[in-house]
Structure formats: structure tokens, C-alpha cells
Amino acid sequence: MSDLLIGDIGQLVTNDPEHGGLLGVVESAAVAITSGSVSWVGEAADIPDDYRGLPVLDASQRAVLPGFVDPHTHLVFAGERANEFAMRLRGASYEEILESGGGIHSTVVATRATDEDTLFEMSRARAERMLRAGTTTVEIKSGYGLETETEVKMLRVARRIGDALPIDVVTTFLGAHVVPMSHRERRGEYVADVAGAMLDEVAPYADFCDVFCDDAAFTVDEARTVVTSAQAAGLGIRMHTEQLSRNGGAQLAAEVGAASADHLDHATDGDFRALAAAGTAAVLLPSVSFSMRLPYPDARRVWDSGATVALATDCNPGTSYVETMPLVIALASLEMGLTPEEAVWAATRGAALSLRLEDRGVIAPGAVADLVVLDAPSYTHLPYRPDGGLVSQVVKRGRVVM
Ligand code: NIG
Ligand code: FE
């Protein structure tokens, strides 16, 4: 917790409607932070006397934005899958590799076999790179255990990352990632376990529960079993769905009032309208399309449906080994039909809302003081200079941490 006055900001993105436009941009701005929260935002010429004595961070006319929120990652994992990546470049499909016991199953083998401290060190290194690139809040899923002990181990590691680094961690139980190889002939038993005994054990470590609801993973009925139990256990709901095919998972997400439905490559306009009406955010993952060489979903359509749009890295060893939000913002602007303004909003405010975190993704009095200073005069440089490295300083709860 800290006090800070960020002065001489050339362009401040507040995401506060009070300042007009989608991004609530204030030029020649300053931000006063006390006890880790934003206390005042305005033009530098108008800094109230009360804040003039605070320690100063001089932004030297650069752009300042809310810290990025990455609302969908699988960053706790062991091993890597570069060989599978090469197979896909030669024409193999993700589903074929998964079906033959590779893909997620190979990461499950590696993650089960890795002790908690080693898994923590590997995963912390990824989170540190995320923080350096401006991510100040990250969601982390389990799902490479597919049995209680490893699922708990993964979620404990995720929480330890939040204790060890100046990054806030939101945890999600993804026991229903795929049916484990051991239960291929007994999938009903596995679903009952996830929704029963496993859920009871992991619930104290999880904020949300997710299900991969897709032809390659769990049916809508199986997903419903898991999410209704998870809701009864007090967890919020997120769903991987309509990624590889359309099976109706987005409608289930809307029906149960999920916080988010993620991927949505095959979702229809009717699905997006249902998500909008239910207040379920649409989390789009452009770096998956990029890494998988698949068509990008039309984010313009999603935005125009009225649904809250969020962007995330989906950092995982299979479909998107991408750690940084600036690349995601660039891909969303260049390939998915969002304007730079919409992409920046979706990577900050939209992403926070998809985690049901009202206190961030915005620079306004009362918000958590998480900010990034770009080594550039405008947020437009994020898509304009897509090779990254534009984040020069990261402020977490009022403390300069990078
Ligand atoms: O979000 N779709 C399923 N789960 C992940 C992939 C995980 C993996 O391949 O290891 C995803 O794309
Ligand atoms: Fe994912």
C-alpha cells in the first residue's frame, strides 16, 4: 500500500465515463494515490494542495493506462508442447492430437509428476513476465491434474503466486477440462467426481469454476451438472465454449448467469444476444487464433451485440503460449475488428468486469491503484507497434513494481 502522485501524464486513459468517450481520456493529467487506492484524477494544473506533497512519479508526457487484467490463463503447468505445435504446422489437428492422448493429456502427465515447489517456480516466472508487460490482475485455472491432489496443488500454486508477486490472482477450478485417459469408458463417473468429491476438496482454493464445454470435451448436460454444483458451493462460473464447434454451451452460460463465456469462435448472434441479456461477459482470445492459425472471431459482431467484451491471453502450453496483453490488444485491433479504443477497454475494464471485479480496470477515485506507464505518447501505440516492450513502468496498489 502506498502513496504516489503521478504527474505530467501526456495522455491518461481512465475508462471513467465521467471524462467522456469509451476510454475517458484526460490530456495533461495527474493521478493522486493514497493507501494503494486512487484518490484524485484530473488535469495536472488542478492538483489539489492536499496531494502536492506526495512522492512523485514523473510520467514525462507519456501515456498512462489502467493495469491490464488477464481474465483467462492456464499459466500453472509443467512441460511444454513445441513438438505438438510443429505437428500442427505440418497439418495435424488439435482434436486428433488430443484424441490420441497428447495435447492436454501430456501436460496432465507432466504436471502430476512435478512437485509443488518446482511447479511454483516455473509458474512464477511466467507471472513475472506478465507483470513486466503490465498485467496487474491475472486469472489462473487448474485443469492439468484431473484428479483431486493435482488440482489442489495447481490452485495452491496459483494462490502462492499472488502472495509472492505484486499481482492479484483470481483462481478457477477446471477439473472439467477433458475426461482423463483413465476414465474414457467411465466418463459419467468422472463428471460425478468433479461435481462432487473433487469440488468439495478444491472449493476453498477457488473463486470460479470453469468447464470446457465442447464436442472434444464435455457435453452441455455434463457441463450443467458441474456448474450447478459449483454454484451451490459458492463459486462463480466461467465456461470455455463454442471453441472448436458449436454445441450450445454459450446458451448454458447465459442460462446459469455465468460471469463469462470464453473463446466463442463458433457462437451465433443469438448466443451473443443471450450473453448480453444475462450480463455474461464474452472473453475473446485472439492469440489462440494466431497460434492455431484459425480464423479470428468477428469481435465487431460481439461488441455490437451489447455483450461486455473482454480480452485475455489464454496462456497455456497448447493453443496459445502467449503471456502478454499488449500482443493480444494488437491482434484484436489488427485482426478481429475492434478499434484500438475498444481493444484497450476490453483488456482493462472489460476484463475486470468479466471477473466481476468492479474496483479495477478503471482509474477513478476509490479504484485499486494499478496502472501502467507506456514508453509512448498514446495507447494507440499498442497496436501500432505490436512487437511489445512498450510498458515502461508498472504501478501495483500505488507502488512502482517494475
Ligand atoms: O483454452 N480449450 C481448452 N483449453 C485450453 C487449451 C489447453 C491446452 O491445450 O493445454 C484453451 O485453449
Ligand atoms: Fe483456456
Image: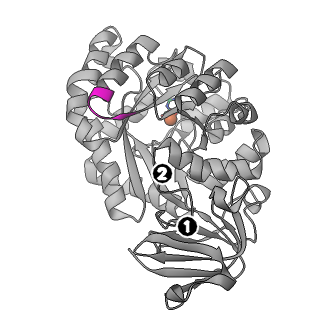
Residue 13 placement: quadrant? bottom right
Q: Secondary structure at mark 2?
A: loop
Give the residue type that dot 2 points to. Answer: Glu
Residue 206 lies left or right of residue 42; in this view the side is: left
Q: Is residue 231 magenta?
A: yes
Q: Which portion, as a residue range, is magenta? A: 230-236
Coloring applied to the structure: one colour
Which residue: 59% across, 35% down? 85
Which residue: 70% across, 52% down? 22
Residue 163 placement: quadrant? bottom left
Q: Residues within 10 Å of mark 2 (few under 14, many from 20)?
A: few
Percent of width and height locating residue 249: 51, 19
| Residue 178 seen in the current view | yes
Percent of width and height locating residue 368: 46, 63
Q: Secondary structure at mark 1?
A: strand
- Residue named by callout 2: 358
Query: In this picture, is 374 found above or below 283?
Result: below
Which residue: 44% across, 80% down? 3
- For disc 1, does the CB lie below 8 Å from ligand 2? no
Q: Is residue 395 magenta?
A: no
- For disc 2, does the CB lie below 8 Å from ligand 2? no
- Give the camera-side residue of 319 and 266: 266
- Give the camera-side residue of 341 and 241: 341
- Residue named by callout 1: 371
Percent of width and height locating residue 156: 27, 48
Residue 90 lies left or right of residue 209; in this view the side is: right
Q: Residues within 10 Å of mark 1 (few under 14, many from 20)?
A: many
Which residue: 63% across, 62% down? 14
Q: Mark 2 or mark 1, which has the lower sequence index?
A: 2
Label 2 to label 1: alpha-carbon separation: 15 Å
- Give the camera-side residue of 30 and 266: 30
Query: In this picture, is 251 found above or below 172?
Result: above
